[in-house]
Amino acid sequence: MTDLLAALLLGIIEGITEFLPISSTGHLLIAQHWLGHRSDLFNISIQAGAILAVVLIYRQRLWQLATGFMQPENRDYLLKLIVAFGVTAVLGIAVKKLGFELPDKVLPIAWALVLGGIWMLLAEHYAAKRAQVLGERSHISWTVAILVGVAQVIAGVFPGTSRSGATIFVALLAGTTSRAAATEFAFLVGIPTMFAATAYEALDVLGTPAAANEDWTALAVAFVASAVTAFIAVKWLLRYIQSHRFTAFAYYRFALGAALLLLMPSGS
């Protein structure tokens, strides 16, 4: 398999999995066991490609927030996005300074997939009960904003957790009972988060031997593939959640996690 084909496949995997609650980082790390290891810059940059798709999908909402800042409702929402991003940025930098590195073993990812599936089923159950008590609530509280920021960092620390899944369910459990509203906030917070992470990694490697060794053509191919497939995946997901719960994704996590635990050697 050529390097460009491998990069294309990794971009497609990233695009499909970034916003589905099944963990894009986990899938990328697993795929790279067969398609070849990639740099942190490569992995984060193609995540930014997927985020670009969200910018295009939510372009009208983003324009509304940008041009309607003087309206109290828009200003309140935008400030909460900024706070959520700020929490992620501060905690994320702290984690980076502590020298945390993502595990490159399949075993912890497999367990994270299984445990994450259990958490999703429990969260789905309790979120449904809160919705019955509170009714349909689209409001994003300050508590939701802060917890979503924290959830993004936790998902980044534990590959297999799923950033989208963690942030959406935190919002649902914290009082935003509308799936569409929780999903929108989680996705919009991801825009500055992933673009900032990409810029941080790029500045860290530019001018170093790592930059010279980076295959920029392969990265560009993966970036475009990620953006295109993410656009399709997000469009599908937004329609899906209008009439379905996230239960099917939990079962998928169980199946993939169990398969990895059974098939992969214990040291992998």
Image (cartoon, helix red, strand yellow):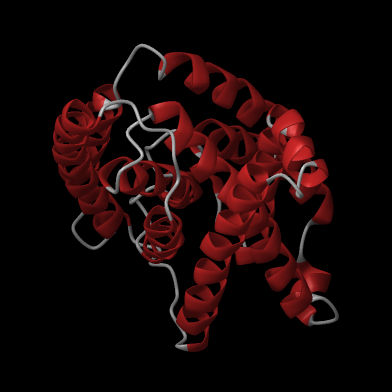
Q: How far across and down, in percent of the image, does residue 52 sit?
A: 72, 40
In the picture, the quarter occupied by the N terminus is: top right
Residue nearest the viewer, comparing 42 with 31: 42
Q: Quadrant of residue 246?
A: top left
> Residue 133 placed where, x, y %?
16, 31
Residue displayed at 29% across by 21% down: 245
119 shown above or below 179: below
Residue at coordinates 41% horizontally, 15% vertically from top-left?
A: 242
Comparing 129 with 227, the one in front is 129
Which of 127 and 76 lies nearest the eye of the viewer? 76
Quadrant containing the C terminus is bottom left
In the rendered view, tell whether residue 86 sits above or below residue 28: below
Question: Percent position (x, y) of residue 31?
Answer: 47, 44
Q: Is residue 142 left or right of residue 228?
A: left
Q: Find residue 16 and report its horizontal and vertical position in percent.
A: 53, 30
User: Which residue ends up furthest to the top in the rendered image?
Assistant: 243
The structure residue drawn at horizontal position 69% and vertical position 54%, both measured from the top left corner, is 45
Position of 57 compared to 211: left or right? left
Residue 164 location, quadrant: top left
